[in-house]
Amino acid sequence: MSLLSYLINGISLGSVYAIIALGYTMVYGIAKMLNFAHGDVIMVGGYVVFIMTSGMGLPPVLAVLVSMLVCTVLGMVIERVAYKPLRMAASPLAVLITAIGVSYLLQNLALLLFGANTKSFKSVVTIPPLVLAEGQLTISGETIVTIIACIVIMAGLTLFIKKTRAGQAMLAVSEDKGAAQLMGINVNGTIALTFAIGSALAAVAGVLLCSTYPSLSPYTGAMPGIKAFVAAVFGGIGSIPGAMIGGILLGIIEILGKAYISSQMADAIVFAVLIVVLLVKPTGILGKEIQEKV
Amino acid sequence: MKRFLSIAVASAMVAAALTGCGGGASDSTAPAEGTENGSTAPAEGDSAAAADGAVFKIGGIGPVTGAAAIYGQAVKNAAQLAVDEINAAGGINGVPIEFNFQDDEHDAEKAVNAYNTLKDWDMQVLLGTVTSTPCTAVVEKTHEDNMFHLTPSGSAVESIQYDNAFRVCFSDPNQGTASAQYIGENGLATKVAVIYNSSDVYSSGIYQTFAAEAGNQGLEIVSAEAFTADSNTDFSVQLQKAKDAGAELVFLPIYYTEASIILGQADKMGYKPQFFGCDGLDGLLTVEDFDTALAEGVMLLTPFAADAEDELTQNFVKAYQDAFGDVPNQFAADAYDGIYAIKAAIEKAGVTPDMSASDICDALKVSMTEISIDGLTGLGMTWGADGEPNKEPKAVKITNGAYAAM
């Protein structure tokens, strides 16, 4: 029974990682850059909801929508101001370092605006917990919502990419930027759209993360962001189903590692898994081997 | 593709390393706070000192921002309250006190910087630091400089490892032992689970002595699970293990930020054991937006309960509430007692403000072991040459959203 309970917790944690990893993986797939500020966009999403619900007393659903909007705009602004100029001019490494810089900028802005005190985040989920097997197994409302949200987002994104013109454009840009441009696809517009979607997902992830683990500080997004990045690499960076599988597996590994190996070594186990996977399959579970043309 | 991945992994490691630093050092707000404190305190002191020119310069260090801000703020407020009272009553042997409090954000490096700032201000006696890890760093400096050092609440053994350092609170080993004794003697439970922070000296220190004493008290530790500073949001596994092991009491030798999350997650799991903590849980009720109903029934070992009925406590609570608007916690009480202990030691030794910090230290470390004061945190408190206080342990229980004496 406790194994089942650990598994459910693992899937719940993994679903959050998966939603965050989707943002990493989409941006990587299309812009070929790692957006390390992604974890901090999650934190911003959390604070927006915190202010809306605790400070202004708005209903949670509205707060989540506003938060998604704020994060979408934030993601697009970051892309336009910090990444786009460098993408044209400099090496991929410069954009990467800028991303780390933006991450620190967001953390320090949050420190300045909200202070370093950890805030207790009121869950936006009002579904009562599911009690099974005479109270031995309790599945919280947050867990149910997180898992459902993860599946819905995954399905929605797959449909979006398969069925819409914008989605097809994304696919084209991810395969060959130059050729896509020659075929009349607005590459910059597509990249901006990717950032917008990724950041909106970050807001959702932020709300789910803070609802499940009810604390919020300027560093809330840092560690989940790094772990979600591990999940994205684990599943095969650039691949949307890969991010999903990577995230959920990572969540389960983390929780089971904590439960059966050592509760203090949980993070070390997560990173060890990354190293092993990369040694065995350098492109990740679902990653495609692409021949680089000379 | 491979090249991208190697860059990616390398940068993930860099980012992880950087985040590690970032977590502890919450930079941007500190300097502003620091200067604020620095500029207001001397101004107040100057007016008091104007009479005859001589003052005792007492410095304070503690976190007024950051994760442990509630402690530092309480110490700062209560120490200022005690200083104002003493000054209003004519000072120490007729000499007023000037008090200057610096922020360290519960960070060892910033605490040392704060100490250097205070030295530049010609501090003669240090009341600080509030939390253990920074205190352990600062005591190295005060020992080098031979500066008298009294910490209100730094409870790690190493925090006062030199002869110039004393403390008002219990040490971690004493807290762990005292907790086990309290649980055993009052028959609170026989099966006990522990959740502690293995990356924190305070937490693991208490855990070790608790575990050592538990056997003597007939307590069985059925599960002892750790977490670290990087994984302090998900406690579902630790709680599940405690529940599966049938623990009636969960001992939490940790700080209140994590405890607030643990209480919430235990509630969601439908697990309702008795929770018992040490002074680190003090502040639980003031976490922003925390549902205090979750903390109902939580017990903590603390030398101070704001609703105690003795006159000293009542006067202190009233004065504190009038001045700062909230109910003082035990850190406030420790700091208040700390200032009065310094006063008693100075009077006993007959120290004058024109003496150097080093001479004052030599005199005070002798007189500190000779005084006995009736304070908020204990009657007839005395100190040994090792710097440890002698007083009775007490516990409080959270009832109707407030600490109630037991």
Image (tube, coloured by chain):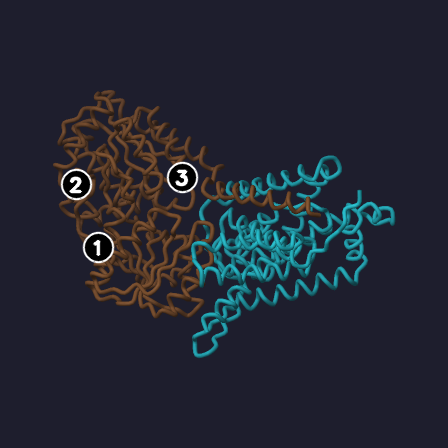
Chain colours: A cyan, B brown
> Which quadrant would residue B181 be assigned to in this image?
bottom left
Mark 2: which amino acid? Trp
Disc 3 on helix, strand or loop? loop
For the residues labelled 1 and 2, the Cα–Cα distance comes to 18 Å
Can you give x and y, in whole percent of width and height, for residue A246 in the image? 61, 59
Quick one: B303 or B177, which is closer to the camera? Answer: B177
The reply to whether label 1 and label 3 mark residues of one chain is yes
Q: Are marks 1 and 2 on the same chain?
A: yes
Check disc 3 and give the amino acid type: Asp
Read off the chain for label 2: B
Q: Where is residue B50 in the image (x, y as percent from the top left)?
A: 27, 22
**Residue B400 in view in this figure:** no
- Please give the label number shown on residue B107: 3
Q: Which amino acid does label 1 sit on?
A: Lys
- The crowding category of the residue bearing disc 1, from other C-alpha atoms within 10 Å (few below 14, some 14 to 19, many at least 20), is some
Task: Specify the subunit that label 3 lies on.
Answer: B
Q: Residues within 10 Å of mark 3 (few under 14, many from 20)?
A: many
In depth, the one of A41 and B317 nearer the eye is A41
Residue B16 is left or right of residue A292, and the answer is left
Distance Cα–Cα, label 3 vs label 2: 28 Å
> Of marks 1 and 2, which one's residue comes earlier in the chain?
2
Which image quadrant for residue B162? Answer: top left
Q: Which chain carries label 1?
A: B
Q: Dot 2, crowdedness within 10 Å: few (<14), some or many (≥20)?
A: many
Q: What's the mark number on residue B207?
A: none
Mark 3 or mark 2, earlier in chain: 3
Q: Which residue is denoted by mark 2 in the rendering? A: B383
In percent of width and height, residue A163 lies at 79, 63
